[in-house]
Amino acid sequence: RKVRALADRLTERDPAVEIAPHAIDAIEDADVVRGLLDQAAAVLVTVDGVAPRRVVNHLAVRAGVPAIFACVLEDGAIGEIVRVRPRAAGCLWCLRENLRESGGLDPEPGLDLGYGTGSRHRPMTAVGGDLGLVADLGAKCVVATLLERSGHFDQRLPGDHAIVGLRSLSRVAAPFDGVLAGEVRWRDIGPPRPDCPTCSAQ
């Protein structure tokens, strides 16, 4: 399991670090996740699939905990970081709805397509270095968010939505269009939407 592999890696890096891995499902064990978020300063979300991302988005906003979502999209061509700061800006659902209404690319359906073989086949085209780059940027966003909240404003991020060019794409909808390999483009999510089932419930 990824959670145990990551725990082993962190322990190898620093044997003194305290780690409590939880091999749970974000949807089926939402009640457990809710309890863990009550103890968290922030959460870094790297799960696959639309549903678990939306569940954690909802739980984190309701708990008032910043959540940073990191993923690789468009067959490994684009990295994306979405930072959700409850009450300060919109959430993941708000961002996706804003993109849909503006005619932009909604990249999430691609996250639910399986890898390997079968009717939902999708090739794994992201290389390890690209996955590591996006994960490291997500971790940096967590640290920067916590430091900024503690008054270290030199850590302020330029936005809440980062698009990371892993390969140059010629045909892709806004806001992912024109991003070059190696480029990181920051934008704002915008305020919470009044019709958001998560933000409006706060």
Image: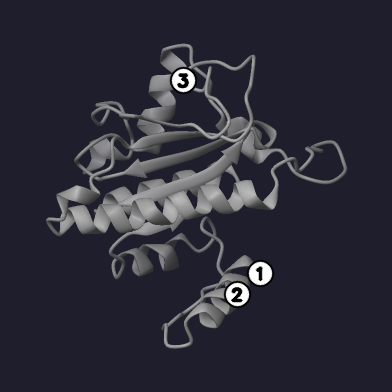
Residue 175 badge: 3
Amino acid type, residue under disc 2 in the picture: Arg
Q: Position of residue 63 (x, y in %)?
A: 27, 56
Name the front one of labels 2 and 3. 3
Q: Residues within 10 Å of mark 2 (few under 14, many from 20)?
A: some
* Callout 3 crowding tier (Cα within 10 Å): few <14, some 14–19, many ≥20: some
Residue 196, by quadrant, is top left
CA distance for labels 2 and 1: 6 Å
Which residue is rendered at x = 56% and y = 81% of the image? 12
How many marks on residues?
3
Residue 61 placed where, x, y %? 30, 48
Q: Nearer the viewer, residue 30 or 89?
A: 89
Tell which of 100 and 12 is nearer to you: 12
In this picture, is 57 found above or below 181?
below
Residue 1, label in figure? 1
Tag of residue 4 = 2
Q: Is residue 17 left or right of residue 10?
A: left
Task: Indicate the secondary structure of the residue bearing disc 3.
Answer: loop
**Would you say the residues marked 2 and 1 are in contact, meaning their CB atoms lie under 8 Å apart?**
yes
